Amino acid sequence: MSRRLLQLVIPVTPERRMFRIHDPAVDPDAPGGPLPPVGALISTNREQLWVGSLQEDIDVRVVLEEWDSAPPPCSDAWDEEAKASIYLRGQLSINMGLAGSAVRGLRLGGGVGDYSVRVYAGNRDQVTRRYAALFDRHRNPLSDEFQQEKKTLEGLERYLVQLWRESLAALGCGPVAIARLRSRRRRHGLTLSALSAGAGRGRRGLAG
């Protein structure tokens, strides 16, 4: 049974209608990044996952979760879903462009390796329609009435980002097992990937 290791609920200010999840060692503004997710929920490369938003002036709500294995699907509660894989060195950042970082260097329980990611989105079209309607009702977007109604839309567009280390899930490594693996790594100079490879060889040997 899968277990959730962490959960963060954070406001995010999209820049150019997206926010970017990446390994902290990677500069998301450097050449070679993913293509902008225009007309798509996500766009990825090896170390980055860019999530498309329909907003530029309104904050969205992001729930970030790490699990020890694949969590139960929850697509019925959301409008859109996308899946990807990303390589992380045990930490994660969420970049908002000129607005800075919503999350910087968040330490992950799964350590270094490839992470499976599910991204769910909700209320994207609803917020876009309601924001456009504000301009029809109020001529001046700087008026108090406009700004008060705009605040009611903050966080209404929402996202759920779930990630987990697939190799650890295959070994049946929950939070306690992960801690034990790290303890062994410190004592013997082993990496988690080396331990995983050794476990795989052991299973093949028994099968033979």
Image (cartoon, grey):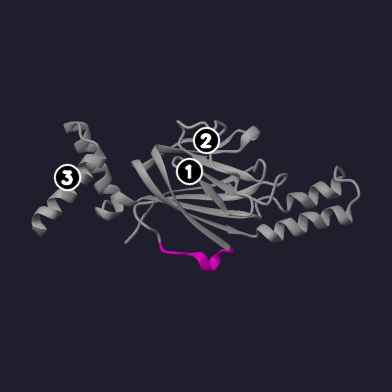
Q: Is residue 200 above or below residue 142?
A: below
Q: Earlier in the sequence, mark 3 or mark 1?
A: 1
Amino acid marked by disc 1: Asn
**Magenta-drawn segment:** 72-79
Q: Are marks 2 and 3 in contact (CB under 8 Å)?
A: no
Residue 87 at x, y percent in the picture: 40, 42
Q: Alpha-carbon distance for marks 2 and 1?
A: 9 Å
Which class describes the residues within 10 Å of circle 3: few (<14), some (14-19), or many (20+)? few
| Left or right: 151 as drawn, with respect to 164 | right
At horizontal 76% and vertical 59% (from top left) the residue drawn is: 129
Tell me: residue 134, above or below residue 188.
below
Q: Residues within 10 Å of mark 1 (few under 14, many from 20)?
A: some
Q: Position of residue 53 (x, y in %)?
A: 64, 50
Main secondary structure of the magenta stretch: loop
Q: Nearer the viewer, residue 167 or 153?
A: 167
Q: Quadrant of the C terminus?
A: bottom left
Q: Could you say whether the residue bearing mark 3 is in a helix, strand or loop? A: helix
In percent of the image, x 62 and y 35: which residue is there?
A: 97
In 3D space, how far apart are the residues under numbered discs 2 and 3 (Cα atoms)?
Answer: 34 Å
Query: What kind of element bears circle 1?
Result: loop
Q: Secondary structure at mark 2?
A: loop
Q: Is residue 53 a member of the stretch shown in magenta? A: no
Instruction: Using residue 58 as the reference point, say whether residue 76 is left or right of it.
Output: left
Ranked by sequence position, the earlier of labels 2 and 1 is 2
Mark seen at residue 45:
1
Instruction: Give whichever of discs 2 and 3 has the lower sequence position.
Output: 2
Quick check: marks 2 and 1 in contact, CB under 8 Å? Answer: yes
The residue under label 2 is 32
